[in-house]
Image: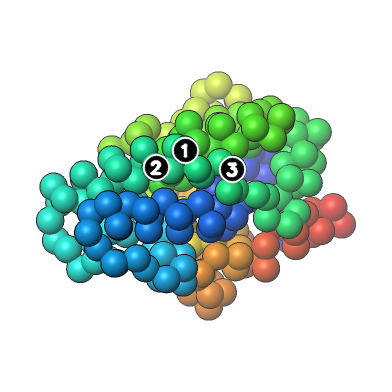
Amino acid sequence: MDFSRYKAWIFDFDYTLCDATHGIVLAYNRTFREFGFPEQPEDTIRSTVGLTVPESFMIMTGSTDNELAGRFFESFVRTADKIMTAHTEYLPGARGFLLALYSAGKPRAVVTTKMSYRIVDFFEKQGEPELIDFVIGYQEVEERKPAPDGLCAARAKLERDYGVDGCAIVYVGDNEVDARAAQAAGMDFIGVTTGTTPAEILSSYPHIAVVSGISELLHLTENA
C-alpha cells in the first residue's frame, strides 16, 4: 500500500493515538456515584468509548431519560476536566508517527467525540502543540460519529486552509463508529485494533488497511 499519496491525516483520539483509560474510568465512576448509580467495571466502560457520554450513560445504566443523560454529561465533563489529561498517554508509535508527518509537512487533525479543548490540552501539556494542527470535537458539530459531520468539517478546513485535495485525506480510527463515519463521509479509512473493535468488524467496512496500531502504521510508512 502506497501511503505517500495522502497529503493530510485525520485521527480519532482515544485508543487510536492515546490511552486515557484510567482517567475515563475514574470520571465515569465518580459521576455514577454522584448520580446514585453503581460503578461499572473497566471493560464495560471501555466498550463504550467512541460514543458520546450521554449515549454511553444510557447503554451502561439502561436509562432512556435524555434530560438525565444531559445532566450526567455536564457533571462528567466537570470531573474529566480535572483529571483526564494527567491520566492520558500516547499509544506506542503515535508520537513518532505524528512527528514524521509533521516533519514531512503533512497536516494532522483529530476528529473525536471528546471535548476538543481536552485534546489541545494534552498536546500542550506534552510540550508539542504543533503535532496537531486542529481538533474537531463534541462541541464543533451538530451530529457526532458515526455521523460524518466531523470528518466533513475537517476535510473542508484542510481543503480551504491547507490546500489539500479532499481525495488525498485519510482517516485513522479504532472503532466501528469511526469506520461508519468514514464511509458516510466518503473518506479513505485505516482501522487500528488498539481499541475494543476487532479487526473483522473494522474490515467489514470500506478500508485501505486494518493494522494492529499506529506503531505498525509507522513501520509501514517508514518502509514504503
- Contact (Cβ within 8 Å) of mark 2 with mark 1: yes
Q: Secondary structure at mark 2?
A: helix
Q: Residue at x 51, y 69 (%)?
A: 196
> Visible in this render: residue 210?
yes
Q: Secondary structure at mark 3?
A: helix
Rendered location of residue 202, percent (x, y):
51, 69
Q: What amino acid type should be assigned to the residue bearing mark 3? A: Ala
Q: Residue at x 81, y 58 (%)?
A: 219
Q: What amino acid type should be assigned to the residue bearing mark 1? A: Lys
Q: Secondary structure at mark 1?
A: helix
Q: Which residue is mark 1?
A: 82
Q: Which residue is mark 3?
A: 86
Which badge, 2 or 3, comes first in the chain's sequence?
A: 2
Q: Residue at x 54, y 57 (%)?
A: 22
- Contact (Cβ within 8 Å) of mark 2 with mark 3: no
Rendered location of residue 35, percent (x, y):
23, 54
Q: Which residue is mark 2?
A: 79
Question: 38 and 164: which one is in front?
Answer: 38
Judge from the rendering whether residue 162 lies leftward or rightward of residue 60; answer left or right.
right
> Visible in this render: residue 154?
no
**Marks 2 and 3, how far apart at CA:** 12 Å
**Marks 3 and 1, how far apart at CA:** 9 Å
